[in-house]
Image (cartoon, grey):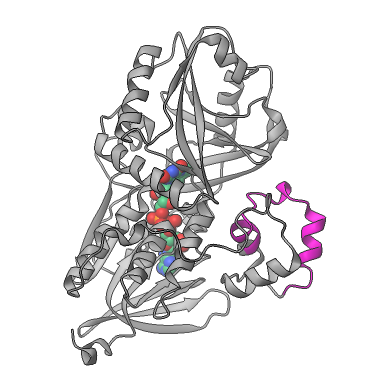
C-alpha cells in the first residue's frame, strides 16, 4: 500500500473489545509497527478477563478428552508468561486428593500428571504422588475417610486483570497506537474500502468516529449480542457458560497450597490461597441468550454448591456464608458444539464475516497470545508485512506502576501517578484493576478512603 492510500484511514486496525484477547492483539500489532486503535466499552480487562480462575494453566482436565494439542499449547504459553511477567504471575503446587471413590484413581493420576509434565516438555516443576500421611501433613483438616493419597502438579496463577492492562501499556509504546476505555462501539459501516466505526463515551456520552482498513471483534462472550446490535450478518456461535467464584477469608481453611477437588457431579473445583484470601471456583451453567452480560452475578444456589464441595473435603471447618469475603461471576466465551458445555473444546476460532473483518472467539486466557497471532498473521499478510512470531516473546516494555499493593507500598504520589498514566477513569478502575484489590474488604478501608478523598474520579 502506498503512503497516500494509507492516509485514507485513521488506523490500520480497529480492535473492538479490551479484554485479554483484544489486549494481546493490540500488543502484537504495536510491536509490528501497525497503527491500531483499541476500543473497550468498560474498563480494560473488566469483564470475563477479570472473572477467571486466575490460572495460567495447561488444563489438566482436558487430558481426559485427549485434547493434547490444546494442553501442549497452553502449557507452553503458561511457562512463557511465568518467565515474562514474574511480578504478576507465580508457579504454585496444586494438590489433588484421591479417595477410594474418586473418578481418577491414583494410578491414573500418576499417568495423567506424567503426561502433563511431558506435554510441557518438562518445563513444569515435576509432579509428585503422596501417600495419605504426607497428604494430610500438607492439607490439615482434609477428610481422612477413604483417602488413598494425592497427586501434586504445578501450574501458574496470574493477576488476570493486570496482565491484560500491561499488554495494553506495552502496546501504547508505539505512538501510532491508541487504546480507549469506556468507548462503546455503536456502529460499524463499510465505507468504500474502509470501515467507519462510531463509538460513544459511556461516561460523558460524546460520540466519535474512526476509520480503519481492518476491524477485529475481540468481544468474547458478548460477540453474538454485539453482532446483532450492529446488524452485521452473523450466525450465532457462542455457547455462553457462566462460572461463579468465591473469595473466602484466608483463615477459614487450614491450607497453604492450592487444591483441586473432584466433585460428585464429575467436575473439579479449584481452591487457591492467594494473599490473605482463598479463591474457590468455579461453577458451570448455561445462561439465556439475551442475558445482560455486563450484569452477571453469582446466585445463592451457585454459592451454596461451592460451599458444599469445600465442606465435603473439610468437614471440620464448617464454612458458611460468613466466611465469604466476596463473590463474582463471569461468562466463558465457548464456541458452540453439539455436546454439553464441559465437553466443549477450549480451542479458539477465527471468523471473517466480511472482507477485512475478523471475529476472534473462544480459547482460554492462557492462550491469548497464540489467538492474537492467528488473526494478526492474516492482516500482516494482506499488508505485505512479514509476521515475526518471535516478536511477542520479549519482555514487556512497560509494566504497571504498582504490581501488587500488598507487597509494594502504595503512596499518595504513586496513586496520582497511576491515575495520570494508566488510563484510570473511575474509582473501580483504580481499586479493582490498577491496585488489584479483589474485594474492598481485603484492604484497610479507612486508609484507602483517606487517599481517595481528594482524587478527582467518577
Ligand atoms: C469462570 C471462568 C473461569 C475461567 N478461568 C480461566 C483460567 O483460570 N485460566 C484461563 O486460561 N482461562 C480461564 N477462563 C477463560 C478466560 O477467562 C476467557 O477465555 C478470556 O478471559 C476471554 O477474554 P476475551 O478478551 O475474549 O473476553 P472479555 O474479557 O469478556 O473481553 C471482551 C470485551 O469486549 C467488550 N465489548 C463488548 N461489546 C463491546 C462494544 N460494543 N464496544 C466496545 N467493547 C465491547 C467487553 O466489555 C469486554 O471487555 C475462565 C473463564 C470463566 C468465565
Is residue 292 shown left or right of residue 368?
A: right
Residue pictured at 20% horizontal, 83% vertical: 193
Residue closest to the eye, 122 or 321: 122
Span of residues in magenta: 430-455
**Image position, residue 114 (x, y; %):** 34, 24
Q: Where is residue 324, by image quadrant?
A: top right
**Residue 446 sits inside the magenta stretch:** yes
Return the residue nearer the eye: 3 or 193. 3
Picture quadrant of residue 431: bottom right
**Is 425 one of the magenta-colored residues?**
no
Above or below residue 5? Residue 70 is: above
Quadrant where the N terminus is found in the figure: bottom left
Residue drawn at x 69%, y 40% as measured from the top left: 276
Residue in the picture at 51% in, 66% down: 42
**Could one spot residue 396 in this view of the protein?**
yes
Residue 241 is at least partly visible in this image: no
Above or below for 345 versus 377: above
Q: Measured from the top left, where is residue 272 in percent x and y?
A: 56, 34
Which quadrant of the picture is home to ligand 1?
bottom left
Residue at the bottom extreme of this rendering: 4
Residue 143 shown left or right of residue 457 in the figure: left
Give the overall secondary structure of the magenta segment.
helix
Residue drawn at (43%, 57%) of the image:
20
191 relative to 28, above or below:
below
In the rendered image, residue 166, in percent from the top left (x then y), is placed at 49, 61
Amino acid at each position: 500500500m502506498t503512503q497516500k492510500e494509507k492516509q485514507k484511514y485513521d488506523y490500520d486496525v480497529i480492535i473492538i473489545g479490551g479484554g485479554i484477547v483484544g489486549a494481546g492483539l493490540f500488543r502484537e500489532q504495536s510491536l509490528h509497527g501497525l497503527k491500531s486503535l483499541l476500543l473497550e466499552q468498560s474498563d480494560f480487562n473488566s469483564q470475563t478477563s477479570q472473572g477467571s480462575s486466575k490460572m495460567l494453566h495447561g488444563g489438566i482436565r482436558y487430558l481426559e478428552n485427549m485434547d493434547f494439542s490444546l494442553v501442549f499449547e497452553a502449557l507452553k504459553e503458561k511457562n512463557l508468561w511465568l518467565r515474562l511477567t514474574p511480578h504478576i504471575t507465580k508457579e504454585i503446587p496444586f494438590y489433588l486428593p484421591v479417595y477410594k471413590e474418586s473418578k481418577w484413581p491414583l494410578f491414573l493420576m500418576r499417568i495423567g500428571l506424567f503426561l502433563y509434565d511431558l506435554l510441557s516438555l518438562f518445563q513444569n516443576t515435576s509432579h509428585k504422588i503422596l501417600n495419605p500421611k504426607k497428604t494430610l501433613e500438607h492439607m490439615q483438616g482434609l477428610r481422612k475417610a477413604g483417602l488413598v493419597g494425592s497427586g501434586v502438579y504445578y501450574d501458574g496463577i496470574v493477576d488476570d486483570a493486570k496482565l491484560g492492562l500491561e499488554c495494553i501499556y506495552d502496546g501504547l509504546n508505539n505512538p501510532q497506537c491508541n487504546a480507549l476505555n469506556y468507548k462503546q462501539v455503536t456502529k460499524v459501516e463499510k465505507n468504500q474500502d474502509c470501515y467507519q466505526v462510531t463509538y460513544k463515551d459511556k461516561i460523558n456520552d460524546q460520540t466519535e468516529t474512526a476509520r480503519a482498513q481492518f476491524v477485529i471483534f475481540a468481544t468474547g462472550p458478548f460477540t453474538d449480542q454485539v453482532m446483532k446490535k450492529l446488524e452485521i450478518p452473523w450466525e450465532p456461535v457462542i455457547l455462553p457458560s457462566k462460572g461463579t467464584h468465591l473469595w473466602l477469608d484466608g483463615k477459614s481453611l487450614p491450607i497453604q497450597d492450592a487444591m483441586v477437588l473432584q466433585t460428585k457431579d464429575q467436575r473439579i473445583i479449584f481452591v487457591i490461597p492467594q494473599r490473605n484470601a482463598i479463591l474457590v471456583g468455579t461453577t458451570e451453567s448455561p445462561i439465556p441468550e439475551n442475558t445482560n452480560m455486563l450484569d452477571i452475578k453469582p446466585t445463592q444456589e451457585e454459592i451454596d454448591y461451592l460451599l458444599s464441595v469445600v465442606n465435603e473435603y473439610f468437614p471440620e471447618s464448617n464454612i458458611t456464608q460468613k466466611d465469604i469475603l466476596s463473590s463474582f461471576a463471569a461468562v466463558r466465551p465457548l464456541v458452540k458444539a453439539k455436546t454439553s458445555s464441559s465437553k466443549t473444546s477450549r480451542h479458539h476460532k477465527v471468523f471473517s464475516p466480511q472482507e477485512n473483518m475478523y471475529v476472534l472467539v473462544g480459547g482460554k486466557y492462557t492462550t491469548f497470545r497464540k489467538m492474537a497471532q492467528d488473526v494478526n498473521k492474516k492482516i500482516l499478510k494482506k499488508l505485505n508485512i512479514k509476521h515475526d512470531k518471535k516478536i511477542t516473546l520479549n519482555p514487556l516494555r512497560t509494566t504497571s506502576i504498582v504490581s501488587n499493593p500488598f507487597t509494594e507500598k502504595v503512596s499518595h504520589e504513586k496513586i496520582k501517578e497511576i491515575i495520570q498514566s494508566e488510563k484510570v477513569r473511575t474509582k473501580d478502575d483504580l481499586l479493582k484493576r490498577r491496585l488489584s484489590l479483589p474485594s474492598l474488604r481485603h484492604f484497610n478501608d479507612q486508609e484507602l478512603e483517606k487517599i481517595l478523598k481528594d482524587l478527582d474520579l467518577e
